[in-house]
Image (spheres, grey):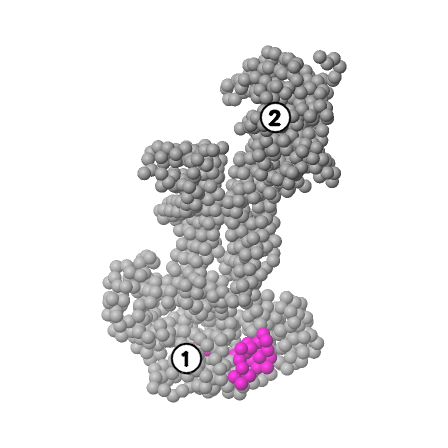
Amino acid sequence: MIGRISGRYALRSLWRHPRRTILSMVGVGIGVAIGLIATSWMRGGTEMQIRAVSESGAGHLRVVPKGWTARRENTLRLPDAPAIDGAVRSIPAVELAAPRARVNALLAFGNRSAGVEIVGVDPEVEQRANRIVFKSRLAGRYLKPGDQNTVVVGRTLADRLRVDLDDDLYVTLSGPDGVRSAMLSIVGVLSTGARDLDAGICHVNLEVMEKISGYAGIGEISILLDDYRRIEETRRELGRQFAGLEVLSWKEVNPGIAANVEGDRGFMRALVAIIIVVVGLGIVSAQLTAVMERRREIAVLTALGMRARQVVGLVVIEAVSVALGGSVIALCIGGGVAHWLATRGVDIRALMGEEFGFGDVLLDPYIYGDFGSWIVFYALAVSVAATVAASLYPAWIASRVEPADALRT
Amino acid sequence: MKPRTKEALVSARNLTKVYKTGKVETPALRGVDLEIRAGEFAAVVGPSGSGKTTLLNIIGALDSATSGDLTVLGRQVRTLSKRARADMRLLQLGFVFQAYNLIPVLTAQENVEFVLELQGAGDEKRMRAREVLDHLGLSELAGRRPAELSGGQQQRVAVARAVASFPRLVLADEPTANLDGENAEVLLRMMRELNEQKQITFIFSTHDPRVISHARRVVTLVDGRIVTDEET
Amino acid sequence: MTTLRIAWRNLGRNRKRSLLALGAIALAQTTLVFVNGLFAGSYDQMLQTITGPMMGHVQVHHPRWREERAVDLYIDRLDAVRAQVGAMELPMSVSPRLYSAVLAASGEKSEQPADAEPAVIVGVDVSAESTRDGLLESLEPQDRPQGNKVALGRVLANRLNVSEGRELAVIGQDVDGFPASDLFVIAAIIDSPVDLVKTRGVVMCFHTAAGFLAIRDQAHEIVIRGSKADQADELAREVAALPALSELEVLSWREAMPEFSRMIDMKDWFDMIFLAIVFVASASGIANTSMMSSFERTREFGMLLAIGMQPAGVVRMVLAESVFLGLMGVLVGSLVGSALVLLAAHTGINYAALAGMEAADIAFGGISISYTIYPRFEFRHILFGFIAVAITSALASTWPATLAARLEPAKAMRL
């Protein structure tokens, strides 16, 4: 249908009006480049936030007891935790599995008190899985297996209670059988730099947690995968294995960040869509002019027997050629900026100020754009889609040229 | 024959024009001597490529000669700046082209007013434009846009615009080329009247025999040279 | 000037092309106006919460209280302070507050052991906080805290699985560090935009809180609301000058909430982005249209120059066409954008539903984020759009205009 001669004709028609063709290509190129850069930024930002959320404790996935989501009751415990733990670790996509148990308590020292959620952890795993531990400055030491009655707190919490290393905290909490109390000795003070986060850090060993709370066992296993894109498939796998439990993704564990990520994504997409539409309108205009100028030529061809379908094909080939040229420009500009973003990154401390904690998540102050082979596909796909869509109307107009009318004057 | 006492509006001596496109040189005029006096109704004729349009363009300060002397309305055209030439075309000359004479988005009257406005006329331009149109019998067409006028009507309005401020010299390049017999006749008669009643000198470039038959002087150009120059 | 008239009418010559360029500009401008209206609206909401129930216009604290939040870092001789502030003869409300970290649990006897949640006692002056901008604005008079009746934040109530009428047990410490506990009745569940109250608040009347904490004549915070939020800085200075407050920290809401200025900066940044889009859209649309239209009219330009129009006149004409087109696009975009803003301001936009999410309870800077935004119309965006488009239209058509002006009439007409 689209023969070589048609192709040649289409291409040479474009070069008869080099300025217009170049202008169209540049228009497409810039619009798509903006989309590329926005997408790269957005993907980088998403990746950063997911990594931040998962490493701040939510994990990519979390196995919790049935009923947890309904009431977010942190004293529920998993049945047969060791078996679950073993099964989880055997899945190849799983990089780390962090068991935890939580309870709400009131800490007191002298006449100072503060409410906090105490988290019971496995120190060795926690140090690798939780960035609140591995990215912070630590005074003293972190928990060790076998510790009795030790606790690690956040700097702001310590300041508010006016305590420091080796001080003993008085803990009051509500256990399975009523109000309980205990004394814990501070061996470490963590400082992430984010005040809200540092006001909520309180870690003990799982054994210590069991002892002071009276709740036996583990309340959750937070899982870090080697690739965040495998969340859904791993989730299904786990769901199959543990039908009696709930397997949550980080989105359900931390809807705040999820909302943020989705919001940003939606916003960027809308933005890019608008830009592409604006550029597309320019293409429609250019194509339309091209068609109107060549009414006579098209009329001659139609009179000689060219079919409407083929006329449309001609216009579309021209559009695709513009798209290809435009995508090259887009790759140069957009790809260049995306590469810069991916290697240099952007310091968003200026935006976020001192606090880079959001809720209970410790964010990275740097966003690195995403850069990969997807960029080529994106540039081509969006350019072609936009220009072909834009050329539909001019193509329709071209196909309706009446030879007699057009040839008359 | 009239005694040669009228002043020369156009005085050309040894005009040559060579067009250079890339490496190719095309000579259009090869030494033209010509004098046009006030009140003349002259036609410059010749086959296509003879240089008649080129000659007219040079006289009208639309183009410049490669060599030779040219005095139009007492001014040495070669010495004029681009701005001065535009002023001369605006204030002292009138033009009628073969096509595309009028501004498509303005009415006939507005087209005439526009030229007057460019020339600096104030509020009186509307009245004067109306007068010219009336004088030439075009009052009905005043409110119409070019697209609503026939070819002949458009050309007549073009003449109205060209003579709106009564210039001394009007240059017309193939004004009848797109017109049928009757329209051409009407147009030429209009221009003859203006020539006789308002003493406007007309120089045509044409190969239309109808124009030639109306002209009182015919200058024939072949290959960039004048071969005959007759008064009829 | 007929040149302008010609320019204006020339727009109608190629309707489709003009409409396309106009459409692109209008779309960009509509987006600018609408999105900025959204930002302005959400900013307004936050501002309302901050200067209203959260911290009023001016706050008074013990100098270290904001950092350490300790019960013993109180404002002493409360009555004297209130008297002096009250004597200032300015229209304002003065509302003292008490805060204390506690554990709260359902007081009902049941099969399951009661689960305790960390909570915060918020003792307030009920009449001062029941006014228009107060913390208790949303409560009916009969539901207001009084005696042992308290208002519980919604999220806390959900977590504790309690409802109105039930009992609430609270365990904590008094100001000297001795254990304190009490049983209260939940009079109301409160949905406050102040995150602290919504997620952990046990709101009770000042007197009851003072009793629990064994405190007299002291408070942790005094919230002062004047007549105008943007005069808060001056008010803060005047209040700070009072002798009774010489040892205390007095801050206006702006000083107390630097994150908010950051949010404003971010909003300005977004404003710039959208303005840039409008620039780009108009530039590309106009450049395209102008270039093509100029090339098409080479003969016409030749004629105009031939009959004596000065090249500058031709340039003016081309520029004028572009600027008219651009301005029309901006006008349409402004009208549509403004209409959208005004409509949405009426109904509100549920941001969460649009993004396909469930409205989650998240907070930023202590304000519970509401997912329904009421956009506000800001005229300056319309103004910026007009200026941006006028400039870019002129610039984008400069090149075709100059090309047209440089034409040789003879050559141009020969084409």
Q: Write the start and end of the magenta stretch as one range.
A: C118-145
Q: Which residue is mark 1?
A: C160
Could you give the CA–CA distance between mark 2 and mark 1, rounded to whole angstroms? 104 Å
Residue A361 visible: no
Where residue C37 sits, quadrant-wise, is bottom right
Nearest the eye: A357 or A373 = A373
Judge whether residue A60 is colored magenta: no
Tell which residue pokes out farthest to the front in this image. B182
Q: Residue at x 71, y 12 (%)?
A: B1
Tell which residue pokes out farthest to the right in this image. B5
Point out residue A334 in the picture as x, y percentages from the top left corner.
44, 45
Which label sits on residue B185?
2
The chain ID associated with circle 1 is: C
Judge whether residue C135 is colored magenta: yes
Mark 2 crowdedness (10 Å alpha carbons): few <14, some 14-19, many ≥20: some
Q: Residue at x 44, y 86 (%)?
A: C166
